[in-house]
């Protein structure tokens, strides 16, 4: 029976009005309702093509505001491709397992979408068609993708259906949840040890000679930030606004007032006092001070006037959208470009440090760990060598220790802690390493376990099932023959 016929027959049925879950956003994630040509393949899964049409449709939804930078776009683009590959591999697995979705199941899902209901809460064919049209989808395309979505839901349930949790796992989770620790730790970022990488002049000279191309790449990368210094000026300003609350001010009156103020400034009057007395800019309370600004930070008209005026001078009157303005150029620094030849040894030193710092940092971290274990307290003198400090968290859960560094390995170690003491290893972080100690250990009240066990069971079961499903999906993808034809 066609899906829409099933819906029309079931609209008045109480059973069919049961909410099965919100799915109105399904098409956003999965790219429902593909229209137009399936053009350039960007990947294949066991010979089945994934096209740029599917990819671009999802990316348009993800980046509707166009706010992603290039780095985010590349990262998210790859994630979308990975998701499309996984989806295709899973749909093929569902087909192999003979998982089917009936028209009635699709109809039940469609019936629950509020956008397709009229004022009385009943399904409306008219609203359904309008909704699909609004998003550029056909009814057949939408229902086809909805069928795939339900198929994937069934696949999840099938994969995770056999997962169970035993009381030992529940007890372990209870202990982790209820244990409270006081922690001390030292985060050791590689960047803190850069200056401790030993480099002699011979090594430096050899690197400059043999790695000119690498030095050029780093120089070009950092050129705007480090080596192309724009012209700057330290400024104070006096502004007479052309449009104040009491009404428009005549241009001739405004210019006459500003000419008189400028004449006082040029004659040697204190510019800060003049700004406090006359300026209608917010900086008046600070004597008109605007700080040091580069040419690019200034209105072009103001920039032209400022950099045509010597340090210590007062600019000509500048007309801007806000009114008339004069500026006291307290200091000026001309634009400078640092040639690569002047900094190539510094760049070489940095490149060598970055290449070798992990070895130095690892040795330093082991030194911290050994000293901490031997003395029972954080080795302050050693930490001062790299300007590092001890951080603390009080009465925290092993799974939520409130650390300033992300370290899955450390979290794993904390989940097995049973007493106070310095942890046995140096644990990697995103930017280096961390050494930690449990300074206080509070065991959970196990008398509460029997009371909490059943409520805990549902949470742990959901976690274990999701973990199993995630690993199972990874295995399905790993067993597939995948070729990515385009990389963001």
Image: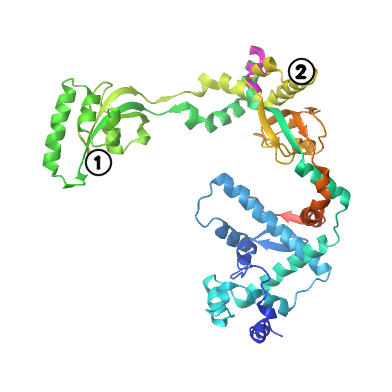
Which numbered disc, 2 or 1, marks the residue that appears first in the sequence? 1
Q: Quadrant of the N terminus?
A: bottom right
Question: How many numbered circles are shown?
Answer: 2
Asked if residue 198 shows in the view, the reply is: no
Mark 1 sits on what residue?
Answer: 320
2 vs 1, front mark: 2
- Classify mark 1: helix, strand or loop: loop
- At 55% from the left and 46% from the top, the residue drawn is 70
Q: Main secondary structure of the magenta part?
A: helix
The CA distance from mark 2 to mark 1 is 65 Å
**Place of residue 430 in the rendered image (x, y in percent of width and height, measured from the top left):** 68, 35
**Place of residue 84 in the rendered image (x, y in percent of width and height, measured from the top left):** 69, 59
- Between 114 and 78, the residue placed more toward the observer is 114
Mark 2 sits on what residue?
Answer: 371
Q: Quadrant of residue 357?
A: top right
- At 37% from the left and 35% from the top, the residue drawn is 296
Disc sitting over residue 452 in the figure: none
- In the image, residue 194 lies in the stretch drawn in magenta: yes
- In the image, residue 285 lies in the stretch drawn in magenta: no
Q: Residues within 10 Å of mark 2 (few under 14, many from 20)?
A: some
- Classify mark 2: helix, strand or loop: helix
> Which residues, given as a range, are shown in magenta?
193-204
Image position of 85 (left or right of 287)? right
Q: Quadrant of residue 421?
A: top right
**Place of residue 322 in the rendered image (x, y in percent of width and height, measured from the top left):** 25, 42
**Place of residue 325 in the rendered image (x, y in percent of width and height, measured from the top left):** 23, 35
- At 63% from the left and 61% from the top, the residue drawn is 29
Image position of 54 (left or right of 415)? left
Asked if residue 167 shows in the view, the reply is: yes
């Amino acid at each position: 029976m066609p899906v829409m016929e099933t819906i029309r027959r079931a609209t008045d049925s109480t059973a069919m009005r049961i909410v099965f879950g919100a799915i109105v956003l399904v098409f956003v994630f999965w790219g429902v309702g593909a229209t137009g040509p399936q053009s350039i393949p960007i990947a294949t899964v066991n010979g089945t093509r994934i096209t740029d049409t599917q990819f671009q449709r999802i990316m348009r939804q993800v980046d509707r505001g166009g706010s992603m930078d290039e780095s985010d776009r590349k990262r998210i683009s790859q994630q979308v491709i990975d998701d499309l590959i996984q989806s295709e591999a899973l749909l093929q697995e569902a087909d192999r397992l003979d998982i089917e979705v009936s028209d009635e199941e699709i109809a039940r899902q469609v019936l629950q979408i509020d956008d397709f209901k009229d004022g009385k809460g009943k399904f409306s064919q008219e609203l359904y068609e309008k909704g699909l049209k609004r998003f550029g989808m056909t009814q057949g395309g939408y229902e086809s993708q909805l069928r795939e979505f339900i198929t994937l839901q069934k696949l999840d349930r099938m994969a995770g259906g056999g997962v169970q949790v035993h009381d030992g796992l529940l007890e372990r989770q209870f202990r982790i949840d209820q244990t409270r620790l006081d922690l001390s730790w030292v985060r050791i970022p590689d960047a803190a040890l850069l200056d401790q990488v030993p480099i002699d002049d011979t090594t430096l000279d050899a690197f400059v000679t043999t790695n000119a191309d690498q030095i050029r790449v780093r120089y070009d990368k950092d050129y705007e930030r480090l080596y192309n210094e724009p012209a700057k000026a330290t400024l104070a300003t006096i502004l007479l606004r052309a449009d104040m609350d009491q009404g428009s001010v005549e241009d001739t009156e405004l210019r006459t007032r500003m000419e008189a103020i400028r004449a006082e400034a040029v004659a040697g009057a204190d510019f800060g006092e003049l700004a406090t007395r006359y300026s209608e800019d917010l900086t008046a309370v600070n004597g008109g001070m605007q700080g040091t600004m580069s040419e690019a930070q200034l209105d072009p008209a103001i920039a032209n006037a400022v950099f045509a005026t010597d340090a210590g001078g007062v600019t000509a009157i500048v007309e801007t959208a806000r009114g008339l303005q004069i500026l006291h150029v307290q200091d000026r620094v001309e634009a400078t470009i640092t040639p690569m030849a002047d900094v190539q040894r510094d760049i070489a030193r940095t490149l060598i440090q970055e290449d070798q710092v992990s070895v130095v940092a690892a040795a330093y971290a082991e030194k911290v760990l050994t000293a901490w274990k031997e003395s029972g307290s954080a080795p302050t003198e050693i930490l001062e060598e790299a300007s590092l400090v001890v951080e603390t968290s009080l009465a925290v859960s092993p799974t939520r220790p409130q650390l300033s560094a992300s370290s899955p390995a450390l979290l794993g170690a904390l989940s097995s802690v049973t007493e106070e003491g310095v942890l046995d290893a140096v644990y990697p972080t995103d930017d280096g390493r961390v050494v930690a100690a449990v300074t206080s250990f509070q065991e959970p009240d196990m008398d509460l376990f029997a009371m909490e066990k059943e409520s805990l069971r549902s949470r742990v079961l959901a976690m274990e099932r999701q973990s199993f499903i995630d690993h199972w999906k990874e295995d399905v993808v790993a067993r597939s023959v995948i070729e990515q034809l385009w990389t963001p």
